[in-house]
Each structure stands twice: as C-alpha cells, then as structure tokens.
Image (tube, helix red, strand yellow):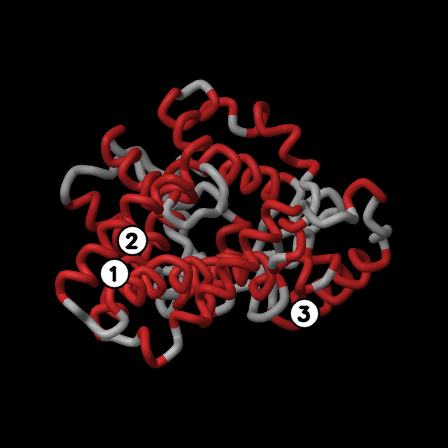
Amino acid sequence: MVSNIPASASTAREERLREGIKATRQPLPVYQRHFRAGTTGFMLIMHIAATFALLPRFWSWEGIAAFIFLYWITVLGVTLGLHRLVAHRSFIAPKWVEKILVIMGSLACQSGPIEWVALHRHHHKFSDQPNDHHDAGRGFWWSHSEWMLHEIPALKHSDRLAGDLHADPFFRWLDHWFLLLQIPLGLSLYWFGEITQINGGGTGLVLWAIPLRLVVVYHVTWLVNSATHTFGYRNFDSPDLSKNCWWVALLSFGEGWHNNHHAYPQSARHGLRWFEFDITWQHIKFLKKLGLAKQIRQAKYP
C-alpha cells in the first residue's frame, strides 16, 4: 500500500528499512564476482576518449552545440521512449513515433531496447531487494555502475519480462545492432567538422558528440539508480529506498522524482508537486497537443 506519510515518520521508517536492507546482504556468488571483459573494456574506452574531448585542441562551439543537441535527443529517447512509453506504457503513441523515440534512446548505448526494458521492469519488481540487479543495499557505487560490470542474473528472465518486445522484429533487430547507430552518426559529424574546419576538426566534433556525450548520459542515468536511492525526500511510503532528488531530476529530464515514480510506476508524470518540474512530462503534453500521445496515465499528489 502506497500512502503519504509525515516527513519524520518517513525518515524513521527509511532508517529502519535501510538498516534492514544492509543486514540481509550476502557476498556476491563466485560466478558473479568476475568482471565482464566486453562491458568493462567498452566503458573504459569511452571514459578515456571523453577526457580527450576536453583537451583545448578539440574545443569548439560547434562541439558544444552538437553535445547539447545530442544530449537532449539521447536523454529524451531514454526517458520518454524507453522508459515511460515502452517500459511502463504510461501513454500510447503511434508506432512510427515509438520507433523514433526508441532509436533516440538506443543512441545512449545502454544495451539494446529489449534488455534495457527487461532490466528496468525487473528493478521495479524487486527494487532494493537482494535480487535487484542494481540493489542500493549493496552500496552507492554498486547501484551506480559496478553492477553492470558483472554477470547480471536478471537477464535470464528477459523473455518473461519483455515478452511483448521479443515478439516485435523491430525491437529484436535494434536490440542486436544498436551499437551500429553510432557509425553513421560519427561519420556525419566527422565530415561536417572537416568541411567547416572547426577547431579540432572532425575528430574533435566526434569526441564531443559521441564519447563525451555517452559518458555524461551514462552517469546521469546511473544517478537515478544510485543518488535517488540515497539523497532527497519522500512523498510516498513506497517499500524501497527511492527518493526525490531535484538535481538528478534536472539532469535527467524529470527522472529524479524517483520516489513518485516508484509509488506510481505507470504514471507518465513523475513530478507530482507544483515545484517538481518534469521536462519529460512537458514533452508528453506537447505530443498530446499534436495528437501523438493518448490514453495518458497520470498520478496526482493528494
């Protein structure tokens, strides 16, 4: 049962919940302790490349513009497309709109859309329990990013968790080939950077728009798993450690109102109080005006 509770009662309950969660954690099983070479190597390469983007020789206003535009495209693809539309079906959109949003979200390189949705649905089913793949009870850094560097048992249940997507050829194709989306994007950016002769050329533009963008989007997304289970306040007595964190909400286009979301997962609107600004919700309202979003589910703060 989800209910409103006074701040003092919420804090006391949360402390008991947090202590109980920590007390029940066991060490990872042996098979899960090794690092996955592919994921770990990819993340290491992206972070190194992102640092090169910040060198003065690669700085340009065009690079910043490309970063901002693609950040907006990518984050919106994750929050509006993969999360609220596909994972939770909090509203209905035409198939062509759904496909565009899912492609935008796949530009985040956070695995394919089927895996992303399956893991997110698993998280809601077992939030902050020992079998939650980014269980906050194992600590901040585990829930932030370490979890993905190890074997993820929840993926064995992908067929059951995302059976609706497995049945769609478009999602199956994109789940397998999502990394290839970066190739035409990178080639286009390189070509533009070279012909316009910006500072750093095509290489600088690619570094700003792909590895630097990906790394920033990664950490913003991961903060929803870590920071919003650690910092902030609670509007609802949900049976987990989820909190509302304003600065994560700002960076993640509204995903930081995480306690609201865990209390009402099917709500298209996450920011429920007047001061909880939700950028993704504003985009959904815009789609509604265009006739591209219907049957919108919306929770309200009492």
Q: Residue furthest bottom?
A: 56
Residue 69 — which label?
A: 1
Q: Is residue 264 left or right of residue 229?
A: left
Query: Going from the N terminus, do you reach mark 3 or mark 2 first?
Result: 3
- 10 Å neighbourhood of mark 2: few (<14), some, or many (≥20)? some
Q: CA distance from mark 1 to mark 2?
A: 6 Å
Q: Position of residue 262 (x, y in %)?
A: 54, 50
Instruction: Give yes or no for contact between labels 1 and 2 (Cβ–Cβ under 8 Å).
Output: yes
Q: CA distance from mark 3 to mark 1?
A: 39 Å
Residue 99 — which label?
A: none
Q: Which residue is mark 3?
A: 11
Instruction: Give yes or no for contact between labels 3 and 1 (Cβ–Cβ under 8 Å).
Output: no
Residue 73 — which label?
A: 2
Regarding residue 9, the answer to whether it shows in the image is yes
Amino acid at the residue labelled 2: Ile
Query: Going from the N terminus, do you reach mark 3 or mark 1 first?
Result: 3
Amino acid at the residue labelled 3: Thr
| Quadrant of the snapshot with the C terminus | bottom left
Q: Tell me the element at label 2.
A: helix
Q: Position of residue 203 (x, y in %)?
A: 31, 63
- 10 Å neighbourhood of mark 1: few (<14), some, or many (≥20)? few
Snapshot quadrant of residue 291:
top left
Q: Position of residue 128 (x, y in %)?
A: 69, 51
Q: CA distance from mark 3 to mark 2?
A: 37 Å
Camera-side residue of 89 and 300: 89
Q: Residue at x 41, y 50 (%)?
A: 108
Q: Tell me the element at label 3.
A: helix
Mark 3 or 1, closer to the camera: 1
Q: Residue at x 50, y 68 (%)?
A: 245
Q: Residue at x 36, y 63 (%)?
A: 207
